[in-house]
Image (cartoon, grey):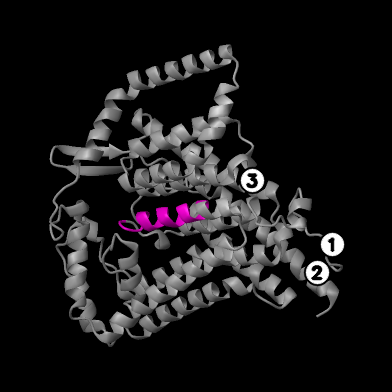
Amino acid sequence: MSTAFRGHLQFAAWILTAVSLVIVGSKPLLDIPGPKVQYDTVDLGMVGSSVGALFMALALGLVALSVRRLPPGLAPALAALLLLGLLSVLDLLLLAPRDEFLQTFAATGLRDIFGSYVPPKKGIVTQAAQLAVGFAPVALFAVLLLKPEWFSVEWMRWVTLLVVGGAVVHCLIAWLQVAGVVPYTFFFKLPGGNIGRASGGYFHPASLGRLLIFAVFFLYAAGDRLRLRPVLRLGVLALLVATAVVSTHRVSLLCILMIMAALEARRLPAMGRWVRGLPLKVFVAGAVAVAAVLAVLLFRFGGFLWQRGAFLVKNVGSLDVTNKDFMRGRGEIWFHYADAWGDAPFGVWLTGLGYEPWNAHSDSIRVFVVWGILGLVLMGVVTVSLWRTTSRLITVEARWVLAVLYITTAVFALTQKPTSYSYYVWLFIFGHMLLLVFHPLAEPSAVAAQHSMRPRSTPGVQA
């Protein structure tokens, strides 16, 4: 392969990488237009996800072709994802022999929380597509490892600010819902009537919650790299937390509080020094301004916040796992899955069904149902590969931040399905990339020298 041809390949890959990063950052804004319904629709957000995933895969393909190698640390993750895709193909081929067992999940009369009936063939194709789109940023991460000079601190800063800014826009929409200006799109069905839940520019509060979790995490993980003034940073954090409260999505609020508790402690000494260094007049004026804002908010939204707080605490349900009120029906689903798998063939235990006939409301259960025991092992390989590759290249403090990301995701996965939410996986992997660029163990000279995202040489010259 000639030097000129390699240069052209890498220039094309650089453009694809740049566009992919822009899509990662602007995805929250792309999700706002379009109808807010329970099922997936072809809207701007979905188109952005699909295009972004395609560009990420193409960028890695072109870079790998030009340098004739893959990053060894991520090779196990890439191989495991390929094998998961092959398991989906295998499950598609095994539909006919498993038809009798699959009829178990075609039962009618189940509650809404089980989800509507999913035809097996359509379900398998959908799960395979979610896998490909959701984990596409692994390819972008691989490009970062092969071409770190393409990922400047400044570029990563702007992508991170785009994500946080998008979260702020969704927060404003959520508060407009609370104020009655924008209609709610999701409601809790209660004996005394329905109660609206703030969801921002999404249909479900869980989608808003996922974005809020990462917005808070990025504010801490990026640190001073974002160059936000302390007052602005604290104001954005307060808005994100308050929005999580009014959304009443409890696991999201729990995860946000976990992140803040684990990472805020590191900032307390510096914050104390900053506060002590303020002139007395500035300190008093700031305290009065904050008190005034809080008073206005409590006067306007105090009753509403108290009502939602009480709802979060009291709405626990039954402690009987098999009862439909345990964790709002999740126990009932888990019990039915366990009962069904008692009669499952060995092949189903090994490779899963290829799709999720009932909404599992738990990520480990979902992965097992979709790809079986092999799927759990392969997803574990992906996770370990991402962790090991990142942790050995970042500072000791950043490793703790990375650990908080994994612990938070593990808690979130208890009752949610993060690996099936494409943008959650995107932001999860972007978090690894952010830490690697912002907090490298040894500052890469190429990254330190870059202030804009450009190839180091022109096409036809770069080897």
Q: Residue at x 72, y 61 (%)?
A: 14
* Position of residue 368 measured from the top left corner of the image (x, y, whole percent): 32, 72
Is residue 42 among what the camera can see? no
Left or right for 12, reference 186: right
Cβ atoms at labels 2 and 1 below 8 Å apart: yes
Count neighbours of disc 3 (C-alpha within 10 A) and say few if under 14, some if 14 to 19, many if 20 or more: some
Determine which of the numbered discs, if any, sits on residue 7 in the image. Answer: 2
Is residue 234 among what the camera can see? yes
Q: Residue at x 32, y 77 (%)?
A: 352
- The picture quadrant where one finds residue 277 is top right
| Secondary structure type for disc 2 | helix
Cβ atoms at labels 3 and 1 below 8 Å apart: no
Mark 2 / mark 1, whichever is N-terminal: 2
Query: Magenta part of the protein: which range?
Result: 401-415
Quickly name the residue at label 3.
157
Determine which of the numbered discs, if any, sits on residue 458 in the image. Answer: 1
Q: Is residue 124 depicted above or below 299 in this figure?
A: below
Q: What separation in Å lies between label 3 and label 1 (alpha carbons)?
A: 25 Å
Q: What separation in Å lies between label 2 and label 1 (alpha carbons)?
A: 7 Å
Q: Nearer the viewer, mark 3 or mark 1?
A: 3
* Position of residue 125 measured from the top left corner of the image (x, y, whole percent): 40, 73
* Position of residue 253 measured from the top left corner of the image (x, y, whole percent): 36, 43
Mark 3 / mark 1, whichever is N-terminal: 3
Q: What separation in Å lies between label 3 and label 2 (alpha carbons)?
A: 27 Å
Count neighbours of disc 2 (C-alpha within 10 A) and say few if under 14, some if 14 to 19, many if 20 or more: many
Assess whether residue 73 is covered by the magenta stretch: no
| Secondary structure type for disc 3 | helix
Cβ atoms at labels 3 and 2 below 8 Å apart: no
